[in-house]
Image: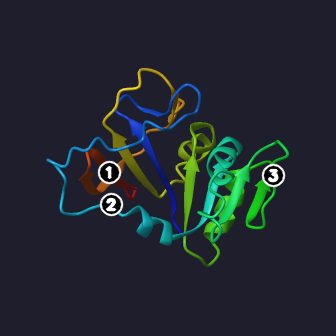
Amino acid sequence: MRKLILNLAISLDGFISDEHGGFDWIVGHGDTKNDTSDVFDFAEFLDSIDTIVMGSKAYEDVVLTNLDTYDDKKILVATTRALEKRDNVEFIQGDVCKVVLALKEKEGKDIWLYGGGILAEPFVNANLVDEYIIGIIPTILGRGRTLFKGDNPKIDLHLDRATVTDGISMLVYSRKSS
């Protein structure tokens, strides 16, 4: 079965974007002193997925501004708005979790739950995320948009991998078996 993977960056104080949705702060800090020999390879991650699930704001901010980057991926956009259509994009209105669960049963590569917090919340609450890949950026934003909206169930995770590159810690967790 395909895995649903939540992969995103957070600030040290737990924000996934600044107050205005910006993420220009998601960069390394030129500090290689603590780099690990094992390095998280984002290109390798992208090669392991064939589908990206995102909200409409992420679609507008990321896909429409980087038109060539995701051409070989199927993109599912959870939205109630009319947005600019592309050949590899499907808009989902209604129960996005149900659509993704059905997709997990089909043949293919893994599925990237791109986020943000509003989109991720029902997947986290239903314990549907198979793997969490979290990049911790060495920045304290002070305020912004959070990943976890609160009122989530307790979910035990297993740390599968930890790497550091350029001051950024990458933590890969999987759901613990019950």
Q: Which mark is residue 28?
A: none
Amino acid type of the residue tagged 2 in the rendering = Phe
| First-in-chain label (1 vs 3) | 3
Against 80, residue 106 (above or below) is below
Asked if the residues shown at circle 1 and circle 2 are in contact, with their CB atoms under 8 angstroms apart, the answer is yes
Q: Name the residue: 69% across, 52% down.
A: 64
The residue singled out by tag 2 in the image is: 40
Amino acid type of the residue tagged 3 in the rendering = Glu
The residue closer to the viewer here, 49 or 28, is 28
Real-space Cα separation, disc 1 to disc 2, in angstroms:
7 Å
Asked if the residues shown at circle 1 and circle 3 are in contact, with their CB atoms under 8 angstroms apart, the answer is no
The residue singled out by tag 1 in the image is: 170
Could you say whether the residue bearing mark 3 is in a helix, strand or loop? loop
- Within 10 Å of disc 1 (Cα), the crowding (few <14, some 14-19, many 20+) is many
Residue 162 picture location, percent across and down: 26, 54
- Within 10 Å of disc 3 (Cα), the crowding (few <14, some 14-19, many 20+) is few
Q: Name the residue: 58% across, 41% down.
A: 116
Q: Which numbered mark, 1 or 3, is in the foreground of this view?
A: 3
Could you say whether the residue bearing mark 1 is in a helix, strand or loop? strand
- Within 10 Å of disc 2 (Cα), the crowding (few <14, some 14-19, many 20+) is many
Residue 113 picture location, percent across and down: 56, 54
Left or right position of 112 against 84: left
Residue 106 picture location, percent across and down: 65, 75
Q: Name the residue: 64% across, 61% down.
A: 101
The residue singled out by tag 3 in the image is: 84
